[in-house]
Amino acid sequence: MKSLAELQALRDEMKDKIGVRRDGEYRMRIVVGMATCGIAAGARPVLAACVREVETRKLTDVIVAQTGCIGICQFEPVVEIFDADGTKTTYVHMTPEKVPKIFAQHVVNGSPVAEYTIGASAN
Amino acid sequence: MMQELSMNILDVAENSVRAGATLVEIRVDESPSKDLLSVVITDNGCGMTEEQVKNVTDPFFTTRTTRKVGLGVPFFKLAAELTGGKLEIRSTVGKGTVVTADFVRSSIDRMPLGDINETICTLVQCNPQIDFLYTRRFENEELTLDTREFRRILGGIELSDPKVSQFIREFLAENTGELLSGHDA
């Protein structure tokens, strides 16, 4: 069973691989809305899916974060992706199923998935 | 309304994050013998005035500027009261806030606790600068996750490192299974 001793073992295993701390140096920020509207609409599994993508793809230059109310509650769950040059893409009505495609196409290859963005959504 | 209590807990804990807390304690206490499920969320954030405490359960009161409603706390209060339970908030400006929600465990209107582990993982993953102390108690046994302890052991490794967040997920899953095994959860 997982215990603090196992955490120590994990630490020893990872010790040699600690990279330089990169606050503010991420290539991309993936921000998931986590206000009441977001959580009620299903943001928690969306965020979990994003974290899983980072883990399985072993991405070290992106960060998954959360934010509060963005003000477009009817579009929740919302995921905003900020590129290194500050460009923002707003994905709306997100589900865990849409996350892998966004990671493959946008996060890894730099090409936003237009059909999932707010621009493509009829109000 | 949320579908699970663990979503309400995530929601209210986000308030603590917004209040600038450096330590957020989440305690879930289940006692079939007392027919009680109790949730306590404690933070050392900026706290609220007496006036704000009185208003926070009003759905049309909020301190955010993007919308005119604040539903998180009212939802939590409603969830508790539907079961015959109650919600209590104590707060001191400059010191922090304690939100206590008591639920009648056997009430047919008591929402399931749901995936509380995912709530904790989400909070720890997204707020690496904040410490979380999570305690889950079932009758007389309890499990604890204290990020301060984890940090001490990990040294310079971030809590948000994928390998660490995976460990935390597994840690919670296994220890929760152990806690609840042999009990009708």
Image: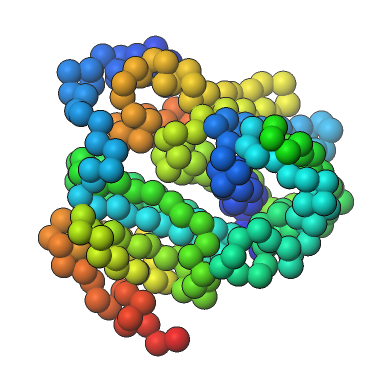
Quarter-of-image position of residue B22: top right
User: Is residue B4 found left or right of A5 in the rendered image?
Assistant: right
Residue A7 in view in this figure: yes
Residue B43 in view in this figure: no
Q: Quadrant of the C terminus of chain B?
A: top right
User: Is residue A45 found left or right of B104 in the rendered image?
Assistant: left
Q: Quadrant of the N terminus of chain B?
A: bottom right
The color scheme shown is rainbow
Vertical placement of residue B70 versus B124, above or below: below
Residue drawn at 59 percent across, 51 percent down: B11
Q: Position of residue A28 (x, y in %)?
A: 24, 53
Q: Position of residue B143 (x, y in %)?
A: 58, 23
Residue drawn at 31 percent across, 34 percent down: B161
Q: Residue furthest bottom?
A: A122
Residue drawn at 44 percent across, 27 percent down: B171
Vertical placement of residue A68 versus A6, above or below: below
Number of numbered labels in the structure image: 0
Quarter-of-image position of residue B116: top right
Q: Position of residue B111 (x, y in %)?
A: 69, 53
In this view, the residue in front, A103 or B59, is B59
Q: Position of residue A26 (x, y in %)?
A: 23, 46
In this view, the residue in front, A58 or B169, is A58
Quarter-of-image position of residue A11: top left
Vertical placement of residue B61 versus B93, above or below: below
Q: Residue furthest right?
A: B84
User: Is residue A87 found left or right of A77 in the rendered image?
Assistant: left
Residue drawn at 66 percent across, 58 percent down: B63
